[in-house]
Image (tube, rainbow, N blue to C red):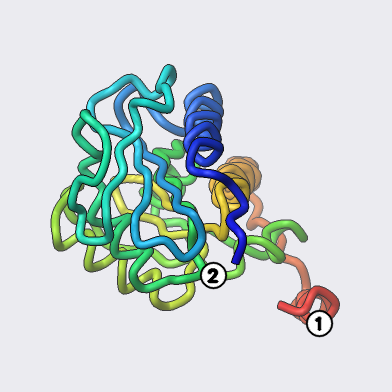
Amino acid sequence: MEALFSEEELKEEIIRVMKTLYDRGLVTALGGNVSARIPGANEFYITPSQVFKGALKPDDLVKVDLEGNLVEGVLRPSVETPSHAIVYKVRPDVNAIIHAHSPWTLGLLSAGKKIKTTITEEAVLLLRRIEVVPFKFPGTTELAEKIGEAASKGARAILMENHGVMGLGANLLEAEAIVELLESISIIEFVCYALGKEPPEIPPEEIEVAKTYWGI
């Protein structure tokens, strides 16, 4: 398969996505990470640890293999590298991962509310399956294993209790869209709850029509 990006273009896109996430408040100064690979590759680029997320440069990125071994770069890779690596191992269709600290989504999750994927047509088409994993300390083998289990079930989004969210995409644009959409529907759902209403869901028969029409 012909690569959608050269490695240099891929690195530039990672930087663009990270800056967008920071500007939107979906990652913090030092929290959150992004990775991506050329489709089919056994190595991926990931953002570094303990470096300001809002002003990263392509040369700051680190390349690692699927075992987490350093291949290229001088900075320390994100502490979440094991969680990214395990997703790439179990999901050949995933070529980009965004780990955000989305406040509205995490707020609803922390309040014990289930994030509904059927309150907008975009959510029905894009999110499809969300998995929730219990809290395990960031960077640990335990967290990576839970992430791997969730990813292997076909999740497009993984919610980590007391931590954040992961968007899994065929490319960076898809992963970015998933994370941003999660936050958008979380705000919609919060407004409904704040006004004493249960968020209305699209009728099941309409969802089936959409799935048939779009082939999902």
Residue visible at 65% across and 44% down? 188
Q: Nearer the viewer, residue 82 or 122?
A: 82
| Element under disc 1 | helix
Task: Find residue 212 and report its horizontal and vertical position in percent.
Answer: 81, 82
Q: Which three-letter amino acid code belongs to the residue tagged 2?
A: Arg
Please give the residue where the numbered disc 2 appears in the rendered image.
Answer: 129
Residue visible at 71% across and 65% down? 125
| Left or right: 109 in relation to 189 | left
- Mark 2 or mark 1: name the one nearer the start of the chain: 2
Residue visible at 43% across and 67% down? 131
Task: Find residue 193 and report its horizontal and vertical position in percent.
Answer: 59, 47
From this viewpoint, is residue 190 visible? no
Q: Which three-letter amino acid code belongs to the residue tagged 1?
A: Thr
Q: Nearer the viewer, residue 86 or 157?
A: 86
Quadrant showing the N terminus: bottom right
For the residues marked 2 and 1, what is the alpha-carbon distance in whole angstroms?
17 Å
Please give the residue where the numbered disc 1 appears in the rendered image.
Answer: 212
Task: Find residue 214 and report its horizontal and vertical position in percent.
Answer: 80, 73
